[in-house]
Image (cartoon, rainbow, N blue to C red):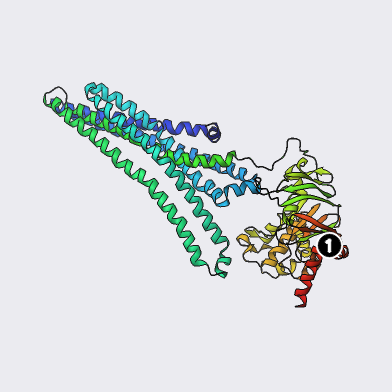
Amino acid sequence: MRRWFKYVKPYWPWFVLGPLCMIIEVIGEVRMPTFLQRVINAKEAGTLSSAMGWEAMGGMIFTALYMMAGGIGGAWFGAKATVNFAGDLREDIYRRIQTFSFSNIDKFSTGSLVTRMTNDVTQITNFVGMLLRMMLRAPGMMIAALIMAIRIRPSLSVVFAVSIPLLLVGIVVVLRIGFPRFQKMQECVDDINTTVRENVTNVRVVKSFVRESREEEKFGVVNRGLKDASISAVKVMITTQPLMTLLMQGTILALVIIGSPIILRGDMPVGDLSAFISYATQILMSLLMMSFMLMFSSRAMASGKRILEVLKEESDIRDLPEADGEQRVARGAIEFKNVTFRYYKTSEDAVLHGIDLKIPAGSTVGITGSTGCGKSTLVSLIPRLYDPDEGCVLVDGVDVKEYKLHNLREDVSMVLQNNTLFTGTIADNLRWGDQSASEEEIRRAAAYAQADKFVDSFPEGYETVVEQGGTNLSGGQRQRLCIARALLKKPKILILDDSTSAVDTATEAMIRKAFREELRESTKLIISQRIGSVMDADMIVVMDEGRISGVGTHEELLASNETYREICESQLERKEA
């Protein structure tokens, strides 16, 4: 409750005024039957006058008007409260997700996180809105109507001793059945969001492999799962309403059956029975409202549990208390000391085994090896995208864990294998490297990355809008823009993870030349399967099955390292072929 109260506290006036306005409406509802009671009783006794009729009508109109004012006020303040509540909750979830490491995101899945930020927050918001309208209105009406009914005829109130417990039992049963069903339904929403996202994102692959029918079948499975889960949950609601209504109408019928002989004997006026039935209806309606509120609460509880799982999740990579907030990367020297790493911590097989490596500041280092040998994992440890299980990674002689994450990642720039661009202009995307970069700096970085010519060929130049994921650009164009973005950052350490694979060799050579000129003092790590991309490096690291099998220059490794020689020979054979 303390967790949720955080989102209520800033807007407590709206959370208080909304229910109070609902109480005004309740007062009017409880008061309304008394006007008819007086008129009917007076008519039966033969004492009804026109003045009394006009007085009753005026009282009903006035009551209806302040009930309307209370209802409008309650809806207005409730809307302000719920909208602000939802906004703050979504912002908190988003901020928490931004702190997650890759392993945290893998734990939830992207589709599930999207569902929790949208659908689950909507369920919580709807419940909060209903709570503001009903939490005082329903119990207030029930208590007030019960008091009024007992005042009219205590003996008839015995009927409630049967109907109210039956309603309460029904509510408990609904909660016990409904909660797991709504939980299952939200999990199915996760599955359908993940499937749709995966399909739409990779639509080009789907079409190129002519797998539309397979994707339709896969979507059909998760869609049927959501349909079945939704029907199962809705059954609880559609069964509850008629049962509750049956109980309510049965109570009224019992009152008529019990009250009619009393009226015939002359022991109770007809107006009293009419008012008593009105109050009985209000009592049972308030219980019905509470049952619906509790029914919606079962879905809200399922969503709330899923949201709290995100909010309580702690990133496994975060700033340590002893991290120096002033510490920055000055030169870019890197050292790996007996580093071992596993993606699955319970697995016996490590991705990296006892890595020992020193990289001098300002040097250009090529890293090569077979697919899956741990090249990308190795460099991901430098900006702490992952932390080693054993050993440590040092930058300028300082353990990377002793840097603030923000400072470390500000001074390390990575161009990943997946070249991600965001919706917006080309200039906006490049300014991810430096938000304050001038147009001249953007153009210079694009020229170094050999991106200036194709950007200038677009009618709108650097104001060309990039579609989601950069789908309106070729693979080579996306790679060059990502390199330009990294250059704008002016990093002390630049990591290129197979980021020129879609670029021709001549363009790649010009990009490497730009690195030597623009980033002369920066440490440059180039991961590539192409020997031509790394052969001119100051040092080449050859990796094989998570271990370093050789370190040296191109000539040294050709002479001494069999793995490197085999890679060179295989690429030479392909060229000759």
- The x and y percentages for residue 464 are 65, 64
Q: Residue at x 37, y 46 (%)?
A: 234
Q: Is residue 368 left or right of residue 418?
A: right
Is 521 located above or below residue 275 in the figure? below
Residue at the image point whose x is 61% and y is 49% from the top: 106
Secondary structure beneath disc 1? Answer: loop
Q: Is residue 398 left or right of residue 297?
A: right
- In the image, residue 144 sits, relative to residue 475, either above or below, namely above
- For the C terminus, the image quarter is bottom right
Q: Position of residue 95 (x, y in %)?
A: 62, 43
Residue most extreme to the bottom: 577
Q: Residues within 10 Å of mark 1 (few under 14, many from 20)?
A: some
Judged from this view, the residue extending furthest toward the left is 265
Q: How many marks?
A: 1
Q: Nearer the viewer, residue 13 or 110?
A: 110
Q: Is residue 58 visible?
A: no
The three-letter code of the residue at mark 1 reads Asn
Q: Quadrant of residue 575?
A: bottom right
Answer with the quarter of the image where residue 437 lies.
Answer: bottom right
Q: Which residue is mark 1?
A: 561
- Residue 65 in the image: state x and y as whole percent: 34, 35
Question: 29 or 8: nearer the eye?
Answer: 8
Q: Position of residue 328 (x, y in %)?
A: 80, 44
Observer-nearest of 137 and 169: 169
Asked if residue 537 shows in the view, the reply is: yes
